[in-house]
Amino acid sequence: MKPLFDLERNELAARVAPPYRATQIFKSVYHRWIQTFEEMTDLPKAARAELAEAWKIAPPEIHRRFDSADGTRRYLVPLEDGEFAETVFIPEAHRNTICISSQVGCALACTFCLTGKLGLKRHLSAGEIVAQVVAAQRDNLSWEERDSFNIVLMGMGEPLHNYDNVMKAIRILHDPDGLNMSMGRITLSTAGMLPALERLAEEPTIPNLAISLTGATNEKRDVLMPINRKYPIEQLLDVVKRFPLKHRQRVTFEYVLLKGVTDSPDDARALVRLLHGIPAKVNLIPFNEAEELDYKRPSDDAVERFQNVLVQHNVSAFVRRNRGNDISAACGQLMKKWA
């Protein structure tokens, strides 16, 4: 059987007869959480039996779930070839977040990220990306609360390295008969894949953009994020400055604070200069330590000093609270641990 999650609604319409069945099926799966065709009583019995032999509509079984003391949950979602996608559910008072992966591993080898140590195993299909959202949504939210979450593509992998599958998944998530997610509730994070970022700027509908920056100079970013050697920081910022934004929309810059490396007031001032003229907000991420990595987390005082420099120069800056560190679910920690 083929997984339904791999198909956009128009693709399904081309495979079922009559084509309007595609809308019925999408609404049943994504809106009503139906997991078997037998439950789709608005379809003829013969059609249900035929469809059941061709399509798999149940979300994947969760291989393992790890529960943090702070309420965060990390999931190992099994894939057909025995690999795993990692997904994180982060509960919040007003809006939850589902952090999803776009690849198994990552090719970019950022030196402060555990996922980079895996290397790239493979891209995830659109259906494998969508299925992560469905699995986390249904394991954490009641049907009445089903829309109370945002999606961030900040898990394993570089989303723009898997461009076609990621954009297809976003279209399925955005489809009114799919998960009906507004683009304002989806954020795509990239380390700076410039040709793909320029391609993203031409899309008819675009999710929120986040740039994983960390170093504020080529000298530091070349070491921390090797992709900078191919696409230097000035080229990245030039593309970002030309990126189409809606009224009052801002680009998010993610900046990991590494003790003695990226956390000084001079680093903060370099970041201010770098972002001058860009509608931006900065997420400061104190490094989440791991025994496999040599970097250390800066002190709270150092984090506050860094933030104050940005704020004093009218740069919106927020410190991201550590979530899920005790279950290896924090930013930069996804490594398929305890699979």
Image (cartoon, rainbow, N blue to C red):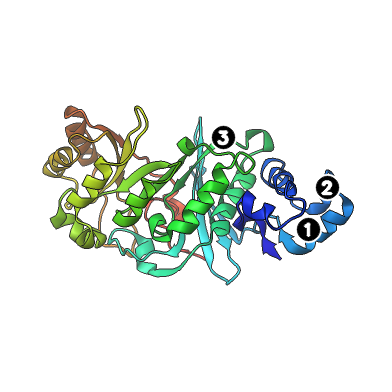
Q: What amino acid is found at the position of numbered circle 2 in the picture?
A: Leu
Nearer to the camera, 34 or 21: 21
Residue drawn where x is 26% and y is 47% of the image: 239
Residue drawn where x is 53% and y is 61% of the image: 125
Q: Are marks 2 and 1 in contact (CB under 8 Å)?
A: yes
- Outermost residue on the right side: it is 45
Label 1: which secondary element: helix
Instruction: Specify few, some or many for label 2: CA neighbours under 10 Å numbering under 14, 14-19, or 20 or more.
Output: some
Give the number of callouts. 3
Label 2: which secondary element: loop
The image position of residue 74, as x and y in percent, is 51, 53
The image position of residue 183, as x and y in percent, is 48, 38
Report the disc number at residue 148: 3
Label 3: which secondary element: loop
The image position of residue 234, as x and y in percent, is 17, 50
The mark closer to the camera, 1 or 3, is: 1
Q: Give whichever of discs 1 and 3 has the lower sequence position.
A: 1
Q: CA distance from mark 2 to mark 3?
A: 29 Å
Report the disc number at residue 43: 2
Is the residue 311 above or below the residue 237 in the image? above
Instruction: Specify few, some or many for label 1: CA neighbours under 10 Å numbering under 14, 14-19, or 20 or more.
Output: some
Report the disc number at residue 80: none
- Outermost residue on the left side: it is 266
Q: Give whichever of discs 2 and 1 has the lower sequence position.
A: 2
Q: What amino acid is found at the position of numbered circle 1 in the picture?
A: Leu
Image side of residue 31 versus residue 223, left or right: right
Q: CA distance from mark 1 to mark 3?
A: 31 Å
Image side of residue 139 versus residue 250, left or right: right
Nearer to the camera, 216 or 203: 203
Q: CA distance from mark 2 to mark 1?
A: 10 Å
Report the disc number at residue 51: 1
Q: Are marks 1 and 3 in contact (CB under 8 Å)?
A: no
